[in-house]
Amino acid sequence: MSRISRRGLLQTVGVVALAGGTVGVSTSVGNAAPIGKAAAGNPPPDEDGHELWLRYRLISDQTLLSAYRSAVSYLVVEAAGAMVRSAAEELTSGLRSLLGQAIRTEGSVTGPGAVVLGTLAASPVVARTFQSDKLKSLGDEGFAIRTTGYGPGRVTVIASTGAAGVLYGAFAFLRLLQTGSAIDHLDIAESPANPVRMLDHWDNLDGSVERGYGGQSIFWSNGTCVTTPSRHQAYARAAASIGINAVCVTNVNANRSANKKLLDSARDADLVKLADRLRPYGIRLFISPSFASPMTVGGLPTADPVNHAVRAWWAKTADRLYAAIPDFGGFLIKADSEGEPGPVTYGRTHAQGANMIAAALNNHGGLVFWRAFVYGVGDPDRAKESYELFTPLDGSFASNVIVQIKNGPVDFQVREPIHPLFGAMPHTNLTCELEITQEYTGQSTDLCYLVPQWKTYLDTPVTDDGTRLRDLLSRYRHGGFAGVAGFGDDADWTGHHLAAANAYGFGRLAWDPGLDESVITEEWIRPTFGTDPVVVETITTLLRTSWPTYEDYTSPLGLGMLCNQGDHFYPEPRVRASTTHADAHGVGYDRTRATGSGYSHEYAPGIATIFEEITTTPENLLLFFHHVPYTYRLKSGKTVIQHIYDTHYDGAARVVLYSQAWARLEGHIDQRRFHEVAQKFAGQITHSALWRDSIVGYFNKLSGIADTVKRR
Ligand code: GCV
């Protein structure tokens, strides 16, 4: 990642003349002077953010608007079912708002301007417009959109073999209008790269959300399901619009008191309600029960996976759930991890535990997502443990078990290497778990757009033949992505208007990991904040640079885990010495085979060699793999300690510039969102300064080496 200069940032956001500073000069919090209000007309009406990227505001470009109006005037629906109805409703209301004209529904194509929604089996227009083999090759979730002639005019056909494909096609068509694309000669064919595109909510039945920063649960309150269907419908629409097809509505920490009774039959009515609300949007319901449920709910003396009574209990429970919800998705299980019970308690393997539950679900087409996030049971190097536990089990998991692996081996740090289990379990379904909610990356205070981070993982080779993570996952029958979602009941869902960009980006990447970061970013900004070029450029720059900025003022060179225990928000490097191995002489965790923990050799040989050697290890992961003296020189010529000082000052200074850049948007966006985000930047200035001062102070004291730059 290239460093971001002060001048570069300022130029991009168009404030260079006002700043007048030199490159690399730090800006203290006290100097965060406002830089003036932009000359704009009356700001648009206030918004609270609840519509997310589905705002569908009237197209302001008159040329586009009239082109769209003549291409689209009515809808023809040639398929049946709830998902097709959702697609038709979304198109009717979305197009009406975007075009400022009523969209009528006709029984058949009567002239130009039709948008036809249909499946191959049900729609004569679809059958006429597409070659059936080609359409079938896209699968039931894939879709094609084509403009075709009708007399002197044209009609648009959105087609699939399945209702889900019709729904995704409808959202894709709306996205074209939202992003100002031409729609007069469309010939699009898309299908998702991954069958698994899931959101995992760490919601507790009492309404609290673990690592949630956007309010209380949207699914649960006081032990029962939240009753507002409109909120669930809004959620399901947003999720479906980015291709999400599975949602787990309960916390993986399932053995906590609030969640222990999840599998009690008293919960069934709630689950039926939630499944009913998600189904019209192509989303299957999952829950996360405790492995100990046979004991806590079933009253058995054990949860041992080879015990007959235990197996029978799971089978009976699955039968009951499927009787109530025939398309129930299945379970997501955290076992033998952070206090959650699991099969190891009984001397059984993770495969035995997972397969026992999978057997109960298999008759019904259900899946078990089994998390590989296990540590604290073996090797003192936490990063090594899940590889050691899971690789010997490759090939022994049932075909409806998916092992779910976090992107990195530690825990959603701002930067860590890719998890070595990817590429090491070719005979097991795998999903990659990403954390959308910003637990370690600023929560709802700091801006940290994670799409650039995720792209680096997706494009990372995981085997010696160069297979990238994204290619690997799409090969599995049940491969793909699960994102830990932070949506809560706050009006804006995430507690920070710019944080929802991460949810949007997650869905789009799960659908197509090859999508360009810039495309995703623009697709999110335009529908969310409008098409004013100043707004689009400014927010693009803020988003694009925010991850390296966050990294700069928090954790240097892949060190990670400098935060406090508990909420993980504040710097507390002193309590992390067992991970950072920081002392008076040097810093970093030696994970080489030659002299350290040997973690580097959990990778394929070619990749292991790169990490084993200090000279070939990417510098941004230097301290993850190597312990070095503070005076070790980086390629820049700087010592590690000076790099730590400089990046922390630069990162915090950049946040001040963010706040100034945002201030320029006053009048360009509505006042409410403008002020709410401005307040967030004020908070981020304080937070980044705190990180800077703590980390710089800590290493300065520990190393006894002075900063060579005089700071203002
Ligand atoms: C749901 C980290 C988080 C925990 C989380 C855990 C996990 O440790 O801090 O809140 O628990 O990861 O992913 O299971």
Image (cartoon, rainbow, N blue to C red):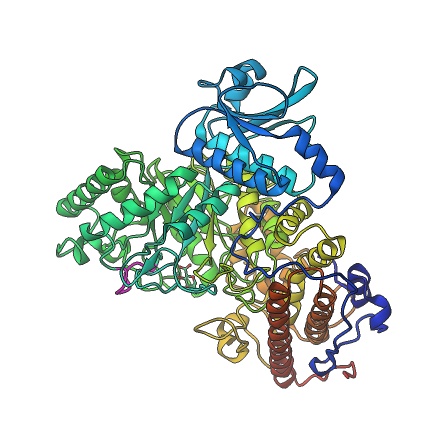
- In which quadrant of the rendered view does residue 650 lie? bottom right
Residue nearest the viewer, comparing 238 with 420:
238
Residue 165 at x, y percent in the picture: 49, 30
Q: Is residue 255 found inside the magenta-colored segment of the image?
A: yes
Residue nearest the viewer, comparing 386 with 594:
386
Residue nearest the viewer, comparing 668 with 186:
668
Residue nearest the viewer, comparing 316 with 465:
316
- In which quadrant of the rendered view does residue 293 lie? bottom left
Q: Answer with left or right where residue 213 lies relative to residue 256.
A: right
Instruction: For the C terminus, give its image quadrant.
Output: bottom right
Q: Is residue 113 visible?
A: yes
Residue drawn at 76 percent across, 57 percent down: 534
Residue 52 at x, y percent in the picture: 55, 53
Q: Answer with left or right where residue 13 lies relative to residue 369.
A: right
Q: Is residue 228 found inside the magenta-colored segment of the image?
A: no
Residue drawn at 33 percent across, 47 percent down: 274
Q: Is residue 193 visible?
A: no
Residue drawn at 61 percent across, 38 percent down: 101
Q: Answer with left or right where residue 323 lies relative to residue 411.
A: left
Q: Main secondary structure of the magenta part?
A: loop
Instruction: For the N terminus, give its image quadrant.
Output: bottom right
Q: Is residue 708 above or below residue 420?
A: below
Q: Answer with left or right where residue 601 lies relative to residue 358.
A: right
Question: How many numbered tags mark residues here?
Answer: 0
- In which quadrant of the rendered view does residue 321 lie? top left
Q: Which residues are magenta?
A: 253-259
Residue 485 at x, y percent in the picture: 46, 55
* Ligand 1 quarter of the rendering: bottom left
Q: Is residue 483 above or below residue 41?
A: above
